Amino acid sequence: MSISVSSQLAPARPADLPAMDKLLQHPQLTPLTAEYGITLITQQLRLLMDELRTRALAGKLTQSDIATDSVIAGLTTRLREVTSSRLKAVINLTGTVLHTNLGRALLPDSAIQAVMKVLTQPTNLEFDLASGRRGDRDSLVEALICELTGAEAATVVNNNAAAVLLMLSALAPQREVVVSRGELVEIGGSFRIPDIMSSAGCTLKEVGTTNRTHYADYERALGEHTAMLMKVHCSNYAVVGFTKTTEIADLVTLGRQHQLPVTVDLGSGTLVDLAQWGLPHEPTVRETLATGVDLVTFSGDKLLGGPQAGFIVGRKALIEVIKKHPLKRALRTGKLTMAALEAVLSLYRSPELLPERLTTLQLLTRAQSDIQAQAEQLQPALQSALGPDYRVSCDPMLSQIGSGAMPVDSLPSYGLVIHYCGSEKAGRHIMQLESRLRQQNEPVIGRIHKNAVYLDCRCLTAVQAQRLQTLWSSDGL
């Protein structure tokens, strides 16, 4: 006997709701129980029933809503949503290769395999295989870092801000650190060099002006409370025009005269001269140490192309002091980072092969013609998915190396530009479209520029392009 549509749409009262115990014993819940467990199912079913009861009291619930199939379907949806990962893989079409908010550098295959290996079995993370005693986890990569940079010693922590914090905490507590006003940078998330110094218990001694700092400014700032001369490489902005900076070599001379350590925070940091592949030159760690500075700090997940990490490299005596500081344990890296770091650093022993093996360098050196061909292949599918109210064109554009690493330098690229051409104002439709792209099962992250959505294809892999081609050809937007 069929149930009429009118009875299905009849209002449902709270008393009409199915009993929890009967629902939990329903055969349709058997596969859900095997997948999610009875504890989570009971919790989510109780929350769902509370929502249905609230709707019933408000007169907004029908008999169809409380049918067993409907309730179990709603429960299934809740279970999938609550157990889905909050950390999602996205497609980076922003044009920024080393995007801070999207996880920065992508690991090469060798690093992925190294991480997978240590995930499933014990390792000698802090175990000296030669002596059978407790070991130092830095020893896993220290010799390799020193080989690649020319440093006497090295230590690793969880990011570059931590490296600076640890260095200052160990070497300059309750004393003054001299820095140029033009180098008091703010890094991602509103973290500022002066704030890091304050947290380390140091006193910041600013010298010079925003645009000009002379050798004499440093010299006049020295006193009995001075602990360090520090130079910060401004990798995330540039001051142009009437400017003056003091060379690192001159600071080294001044530091030697007064027996003060000279340190350099390189920020993004690189181990090779990027200019050999047509990219802008950045001072390498080896070049910086060769000037005679005592310590250099830099990141692992930017231009180096590895996992998030921070390095302190330089004089052995100072590194030993830093390693003994209590913060070192709080800021140390885990086995996954160490495994990935060793694999990535090993690639630098064959620098001529880096464009083939290091993912970051692959993306930075990708030919514009290759990117253009990919964009042109995707254009018809996206145009069809969007319909006549939008116009999708393939246009040249400029990629950015990194949001916090060389942001003023750009790379010739290609991508898709989406304009709204309907009768209403374009702004709202463009913002809604950008949001819809972000809400796809595999979110697509582009950018809005000049009242259009820009999708730069520099970081788009062949596999991702194929998935987008299939999605846009079948489902639309």
Image (tube, helix red, strand yellow):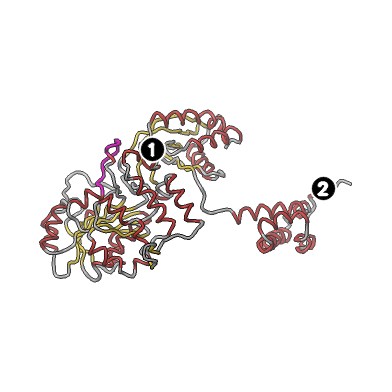
Label 2: element kind: helix
The correct choice, above or below, for 413 with respect to 359 in the image is above
Neighbor class of circle 1 (other Cα within 10 Å; few <14, some 14-19, many 20+) is: few
The majority secondary structure of the magenta stretch comes to loop
**Do residues under tags 1 and 2 come within 8 Å of each other at their CB atoms?**
no
Q: Work out how far the residue at label 1 is from the one at label 2, CA to CA, in angstroms.
A: 66 Å
Q: Amino acid at mark 2?
A: Ser
Q: Does residue 189 appear left or right of residue 444 in this picture?
A: left
Q: Quadrant of the C terminus?
A: top right
User: In the image, residue 90 lies at what x, y percent?
Assistant: 49, 45
User: In the image, residue 49 lies at what x, y percent?
Assistant: 71, 61
Q: Does residue 289 appear left or right of residue 15 in this picture?
A: left
- Is residue 283 part of the magenta span, yes or no? yes
Instruction: Inspect this view and state whether residue 17 appears.
Output: no
Q: Amino acid at mark 1?
A: Glu
- Is residue 458 part of the magenta span, yes or no? no
The disc label shown at residue 356, or none = 1
The correct choice, above or below, for 111 with respect to 124 in the image is above
The disc label shown at residue 6, or none = 2
